[in-house]
Image: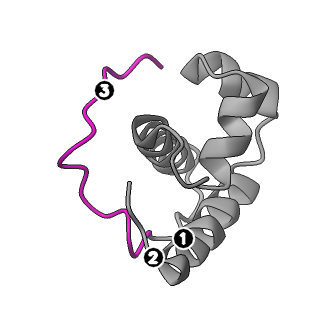
Amino acid sequence: MSLTKSELTQTRTEMAKNYEQLNMSPIDIQKALNFSPLDLKNALEVVPHYNPTNVWKLRDYLEEKLKEQGKPFYPFSILTINRYYPYEKNW
């Protein structure tokens, strides 16, 4: 995933807002996505050169769970359509 510095900053902000809004334990999210603690940290922080598929999985998981809970979803302005990083939904 090649994002500019400003795109990374914006995506990190959006990811953090949705993560905080979800109010689930990190362990529950890790179990649901089969992530290690480091995977969750890297996906939340949209670390450059980290697995982009996991970033998309977390993004989609947050959106789905927030909608299920009837909570507002903070829209992503950069990660809008996943065209290049397919994954099998495992939650």
Residue 30 horizontal side relative to residue 68, left or right: right
Q: Main secondary structure of the magenta part?
A: loop
* SS category of the residue bearing label 1: helix
Q: Quadrant of residue 77?
A: bottom left
Q: CA distance from mark 1 to mark 3?
A: 22 Å
Residue 2, relative to residue 26: is it above or below?
below
Point out which mark residue 70 bears. none
State the extent of the magenta-drawn residues as a range. Answer: 76-91
Q: CA distance from mark 2 to mark 3?
A: 24 Å
Q: x, y (%) of residue 53? A: 40, 36
Q: x, y (%) of residue 12? A: 62, 66
Callouts 1 and 2 close, C-beta under 8 Å = yes
| Label 1 Cα crowd, 10 Å radius (few <14 / some 14-19 / many 20+) | some
Q: Mark 2 sits on what residue?
A: 4
Q: Amino acid at mark 1?
A: Leu
Q: Mark 1 sits on what residue?
A: 8
Residue 47, relative to residue 41: is it above or below?
below
Q: Amino acid at mark 3?
A: Tyr
Q: x, y (%) of residue 38? A: 74, 31
| Label 2 Cα crowd, 10 Å radius (few <14 / some 14-19 / many 20+) | few
Of badges 1 and 3, nearer the viewer stands 1
Residue furthest left as drawn? 83
Q: Mark 3 sits on what residue?
A: 87
* SS category of the residue bearing label 2: loop
